Image (tube, rainbow, N blue to C red):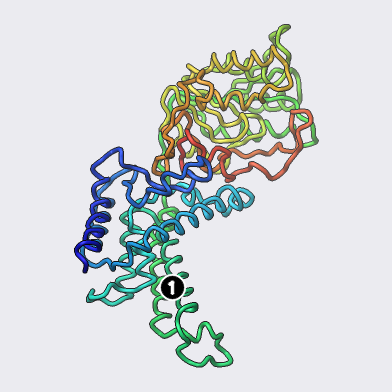
Amino acid sequence: MNLTSDTVLAAFNASLQVLPLLIPQWRWPFAPRQVTDGRDLLPLLLAPWSAPSHIHPGIVLSRLLQAIIFFTRIPSDFHLAAYPLWIVLALIRTQLGYLLTRSAGWAFPSLFRHWALYEETSGMGPIMVIYFYMTGVPEGMPVEEGPFLVLLSVLFGWLDNAPWTYSLAIAIGLALSFIFRVAFTEQRSLPTPSIPPSFAKFTPADMLKYRVGLVSLLLLTCPYGLYNLFYTPPSIPVASLDIVILSFPRPGPDSDSFLSTTIASFVPHISENISLSVFTHANGFAAFTAAQSTFSDVVTFHADADQHPVEQWGQYLHLAEALKWAKGEWVMLIEDDFPLCPGGWGAIELVMAGMRPGQAGFVGTGGSGLIMHRSQLNILSDLLRLNAQNPVEWRKPPDVVMQECLLGVSGLCRGMLNVDGLGRGMGGGDDGGMIITSRLVLDHIGGMASTTLGKPGNTDKWRCGWRHAFHGKRGVEVVVV
């Protein structure tokens, strides 16, 4: 080995796998959402020489192993191939993350995968996996190729806790190996009529590599699949929470049942700390009267009869009055056609467990599922009332007014939004002003009976399990459900 080039370069790269762990500012881990939602390319360009957001013993061991490989067994041509391979991997991860969250993952909720967009990647481990799947065991290493490739990819994947990244690294390594074999290797034997010419170039050793890749993928992903299958989130006591259901007469033959269905989904969770209320600005409509006769022993019903000659009556004023009337340390607003999804209460408990005064939660869509601290209610009510007093065409919808205030965009409900431009955060996202669930945990059963004039109806959008509208957004933390 040339001491003036290869050895020095290997030592330099090895040191860059370990030194970032010691320097807190040296952290630019890559996650696809930084590109898809933040338009930030810096982590994509620098992640191979970055530390992850959170350092744990597994990461330290992974980086030490990478440094050892650099010092002892890395071929000289790796240094030329490494960065192009990383760019290929990062771009494919970005496209896949977008596909499984914002594209097909939005249109078909069963395809939605949170970690495809949020999983962080840093270091040279994934690049080594691609390279060694392309080239085989390093020269002079006394091990069989199959066990070496399986151990390398699975161990690095587990230690880095990055199954999406390392699964793609295995697939890319195999694909590039196939391409180079077909494109640059002379045909080894004459093809038979039943074997395509390209496949006739493969030896049993070539086919063994693909079987090894399949075994590696299964071993790498199985623990995560079993965890997701059998893990049950612990039940976390919720602090004082007042769930306020906003109700209003709706068009449509089935609309009278919406309110009772929504109330019934939350009643099992009423406790000493959790109360359920129904608030309306309209008197005497059938759905309100029927629900009151059924649930009045466990639910508080309130029909607001105040007169407001200054403000224009409508959704802004309805929300403003409800926030003024609400009780409890924390308040969650629900529209009367947003019942709780099966298993959704556990997700609400997890969201509230991570909240602190000044933060907000959001588990639904529109204005439903917003959870806020009592200290934020007055300013939200005043903002909505201001919009009710000034009915101009360019004003924002009431749910957007509330969302932006709670996010910190306006700086009124909390401090101005100031999140890390790199979009750091292992799964939880940014330490911002709002905590959301990765999927919606409130159903929307009244899509065809909107109370908003001119709003088109829909029957199948924003239902249970759909991707949260803020998923991937800067300034939000994410509870994975």
Q: Is residue 209 visible?
A: yes
The image shows residue 269 at horizontal and vertical percentages of 51, 33
| Residue at the limit of the structure toward the front, as seen here | 4
Q: Is residue 198 left or right of residue 309?
A: left
Q: Is residue 389 above or below residue 64?
A: above
Q: Is residue 312 left or right of residue 36?
A: right
User: In terms of image quadrants, where is residue 392?
Assistant: top right
Vertical placement of residue 352 versus 40, above or below: above
Who is closer to the viewer here, 305 or 39?
39
Q: Position of residue 329 (x, y in %)?
A: 46, 20
Q: Nearer the viewer, residue 438 or 290?
A: 438
Q: Quadrant of the N terminus?
A: bottom left
What residue is drawn where x is 46% and y is 28%? 433
Among the 4 quarters of the image, the one containing residue 341? top right
Name the spot of residue 331 as percent of width and height, x first.
52, 23
Residue that mark 1 sits on: 177
At 43% from the left and 29% from the top, the residue drawn is: 355
Q: Amino acid at mark 1?
A: Ser
Crowding around mark 1 (Cα neighbors within 10 Å: few <14, some 14 to 19, many 20+) is: many
* Left or right for 66, reference 108: left
Pinpoint residue 4: horizontal percent, then vertical percent: 21, 61
Please indicate, yes or no, whether residue 297 appears anywhere in the rendered image: no
Query: Count the marks: how many?
Result: 1
Provide the secondary structure element on which disc 1 rests: helix
Image vertical order of residue 262 relative to residue 188, above or below:
above
Farthest residue, direction left: 3
Residue in view at x 40 percent, y 60 percent: 166
Residue in the foreground of this view, choosing between 82 and 475:
82
